[in-house]
Amino acid sequence: MRISYDRDADILMIEISDEDVDYAEEAGPMIIHFSKNGKPVLIEILDASEFLAEITKISMKAKNKELIEAQI
């Protein structure tokens, strides 16, 4: 797995596999690239700085030894 960030385009890329990309689908702020077999190969997170800023707003609270995720 390789992770890279293009600062100029503000795209975070997560390469999951070395397989060839056959097609891609957009899912919200992400573009997911798939192999011929439908296996995810690459995930691109568009506007990554904004996406990561929202993720960091999520707080976790411990309650009775269970983790509860706060709403964004």
Image: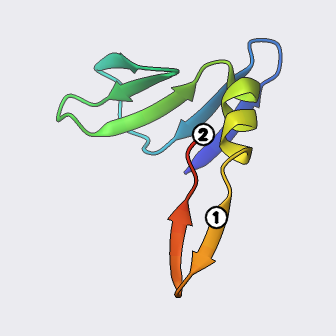
13 or 52, nearer to the observer: 52
Separation (CA) of disc 2 from disc 1? 11 Å
Which element type, helix, strand or loop, lies under badge 1? Answer: strand
The relative height of residue 2 versus residue 47 in the rendered view (above or below) is: below
Q: How many marks?
A: 2
Residue type pointed to by label 2: Ile
Front position in the image: 40 or 19:
40
In this view, 35 is above or below 39: above
| Residue 40 on image: x %, y % | 34, 38
Residue named by callout 2: 72
Left or right: 62, with 57 as reference point: left
| First-in-chain label (2 vs 1) | 1
Q: Which residue is drawn at 52% across and 39% down?
A: 15
Residue at which label 1 appears: 60
Residue 18 image position (x, y, % from top left) = 43, 41
Image quarter of residue 21:
top left
Residue at (73, 25) in percent of width and height: 50
**Residue at position x 82%, y 21% in the image:** 7
30 to the left or right of 53: left
Rendering quarter of residue 49:
top right
Q: Position of residue 35 (x, y in %)?
A: 27, 31
Place residue 39 in its image quadrant: top left
Q: How crowded is mark 2: few (under 14 residues within 10 Å), some or many (20 or more)?
A: few
- SS category of the residue bearing label 2: loop
Q: In this view, does 60 lie to the left or right of 71?
A: right
